[in-house]
Image (cartoon, rainbow, N blue to C red):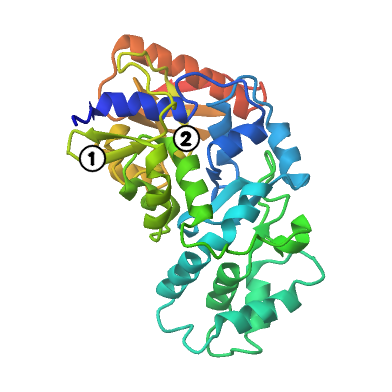
Amino acid sequence: MTVAVLDRRALNRAALARQLLLDRAGLPALDAVRHLCGLQAQEPQEPFTGLWSRLRDFDPASLSELLTGRRVVRTHLMRRTVHLLTAEDTLAWRTRHDAMLLQRVVGVYRGRLDGVDPAELAAVGRELTADGEPRPVGELGRALTERWPDAGPRPLGEMLLAVLPMVQCPPRGVWRAKAAGARHAALSSWLGRDAAPAPDDPSDPVGQDLVRRYLAAYGPAASADLRAWCGVSGLPAAVAAVREELVTFRDERGRELLDLPDAPRPDPDTPAPVRFLPAFDNAILGYHDRSRIIDDEHRGLSVAGERVVLVDGRVAATWTVREDTISVTPLHRLTPTARDAVAEEGRALASFLSEGESERVRVG
């Protein structure tokens, strides 16, 4: 049977459609966060730009209200980075990421955590956080050194975030909050529920949900892309369990790509508008092979925290904001039409970020 080949432009347009970057969606913020499987959020204000670029008439107050109302949370999950996720997804997915989270923090602090039993640490952490009072991770780490004095407060605090589900509490992540340091509370006390236990099922039902949801927001994609997105390597059973539901393609390198049969795959010639993306945006970091959206020579921008501008669906510039002025630095010469489109979108973004006080934009 012949398998259709999707070239880079076809994959680009599919990714833009799934990421709500081809047309701004008329979704509530909560539904958008759910559809996107969360937004990477180690920089607290970046998700606001990410949703502004994806949603029509996005009101940043709506996202702040979701945080303070505990319907979305900021927590370490995919790839052990801070993500903004719905409360329901966090409760459903956290346990499936436990092993990866612990493995990565132990890898960072090689040898420093030898002799620290994860189960015992989690039990002590539950006692420390039982009152529900949000605390900085440094304070938690220092308290843990009473039991493990040789490990040091920072490694212990980071390990606690891996073994005990925790959330970063508001005002961290609230719109235009200034210098709000991260304070953590146990997920169970913040949401009033524990994370769902891992099902005793070799077909990995939680992994199956991750596969389906990932493809809805990122597909078509290879298994390596799925692993790169979530950081969890043990999903073969989940992929095998849902494979009959899926359709397959090949990319130009010959890799097998999986997808949901009814998911959008727009015509490669579909026009793509200029979009400003925040630092560490999902649309780039959600893949192992990022060539569908960024050239290999610029791949380093995606992990350096540079904010980027998409022109015709591809990374074509970086941008910064200072004193309510958007400054755009092209990575290559832009056509006059593209420069005008970048300037127009930049003015709209400047107005959003300054709450109507400025429409200043400079295109280098």
The local secondary structure at tag 2 comes to helix
Q: Does the CB distance between marks 2 and 1 fall below 8 Å? A: no
Amino acid type at image mark 1: Asp
Q: Is residue 94 left or right of residue 331?
A: right
Determine which residue is flagged by label 2: 216
Locate residue 174: give its quadrant: top right
Q: Position of residue 12 (x, y in %)?
A: 33, 27
Q: Position of residue 164 (x, y in %)?
A: 63, 69
Q: Nearer the viewer, residue 26 or 248?
A: 248
Residue farthest to the right, as pictured: 131
What residue is rendered at 52% in x and 47% in y?
Answer: 209
Q: Residues within 10 Å of mark 1 (few under 14, many from 20)?
A: few
Determine which residue is flagged by label 1: 296
Frontmost of labels 2 and 1 is 2
> Which image quadrant: the N terminus?
top left
Q: Nearer the viewer, residue 19 or 194?
A: 194
Question: Does residue 145 lie above or below 15 as drawn?
Answer: below
Q: How many marks?
A: 2
Q: Is residue 62 left or right of residue 317?
A: right
Q: Residues within 10 Å of mark 2 (few under 14, many from 20)?
A: many
What residue is rendered at 65% in x and 63% in y?
Answer: 166
